[in-house]
Amino acid sequence: MDRCVDQFGLQPVPDAWKDSTHGRGSETAWKRYYNYRSRVEDIADVDKLSEDDDGYLDYKYLKEWQQEVELRSEEYMATDVEWHWTPKLGNLTWEDYEQLRSAEYYAHVWSPFAIPHAIELEHRYHGRARYRSFEFFTFWGYRLIDFEDESTIDSDRFKNICSNCYEDDVLRQDIIKESHMNNNTSSKIRKFLYGTDSDESKAITCSDMNLWLMLFASMGTTDPDLDTDPNDCDHGYAWCPSRDKEMKQKLYDLGASEGNDPRANPNGPIEDYYPSGCGWLKHRLLQITGNLGPVTQHYQPPTIKDAGGYDENYQLWMDRKAKYQAKVDRLKNDTEFMDRLIQRYQNPRDSMLVCMKWFKISSSSYDQDVNYDEACWSDSDSDDNM
């Protein structure tokens, strides 16, 4: 352990909770820790690259990321506790020079104390404009590495923190998953990293909100508002109350103003009142840390009408598709219908032909304008009369 303390600048576990931690780690655990961290930090040594290397653009991007995290650390962490982390860029795909299409961010966060624990972080982003569509997804995840448990060291089982994507590249509707970004996850990470999730640990290290901000920054999301990654890589939906006439009026009547927003002065005319909203990720952070304000507490999640490709024609098409899908489902599940259809046609040949026609219709594309009654029955024998 002493070798690790000296090599990596680890601090003693604070007296306030040193007795509640699970020991200081076995010699075996510390040996694994030393070998693993030495290997990770050697691989991540970006200073080995130069401007003449093919990967210099990636190198420049990584250096800027490191500098941003250092600034965030000075702002969010307590004075006497450092943020121990080791970044690593995965694959970067550039659309053209300095226009990022896809990125993979990896990092290890190490306990600043003499606790043989680390957290590996992962963040992926992809955004690519097509002629009439847009490909998009973004994901954040983590895994815990306990060097007492050898099986956790090389595991690739990451747990999801949150994500957003477009399942339909044309519709561009945000599919947000954020349920795992909660107080339980925060408590688990804090206890694993610092040895306890007590209020004392928050005073000595950082608040829950700042812990999340440091974790996201360590995954490449250094924007304090969590709206974008570097190079304007957008995370999707942002709630804008000033664009919603009813919501704007509601907030104005409530006299809602948040922070030092100069455009959200409820004491002036409503024409000059433009309250700022927030993105979905920032809202989730404010929500789970108890920091929602007079404006953000009225946040509205995205609906299909907020999708970039939504219009009235799309809704009409979806309604028609749902109508015929429901009818096909009913016909498929209605065995009695099939029996009566067969009984209607006593001639085996006619019965077989009608059944074949019915199967063909029921298995066709559901968005076609098909009249199933007319297809299987005469005008005088609709299914309403069966």
Image: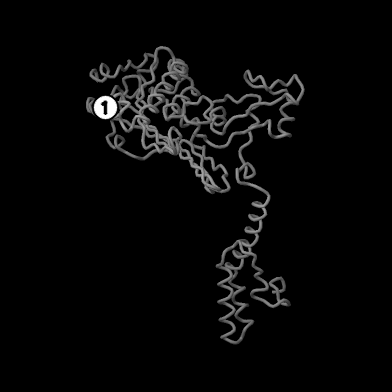
The single residue placed furthest to the bottom in the displayed view is 347
Which of 80 and 219 lies nearest the eye of the viewer? 219
Image location of residue 156, percent across then percent down: 34, 39
Please give left or right for residue 330 compared with residue 42 in the image: right
Q: Which residue is mark 1?
A: 42
**Quadrant of res 1:** top left
Which of 371 and 63 lies nearest the eye of the viewer? 63
The local secondary structure at tag 1 comes to helix
The coloring applied to the image is one colour
Instruction: In the rendered view, tell whether residue 312 sits above or below residue 32.
Output: below
Amino acid tagged 1: Asp
- Quarter of the picture containing the C terminus is bottom right
Please give left or right for residue 235 compared with residue 19 in the image: right
Q: Residue at x 49, y 23 (%)?
A: 208
The single residue placed furthest to the right in the displayed view is 269
Image location of residue 26, percent across then percent down: 25, 25
Please give left or right for residue 90 compared with residue 213 in the image: left
For the residue carrying disc 1, how many other residues have a C-alpha within 10 Å: few (<14), some (14-19), or many (20+)? few
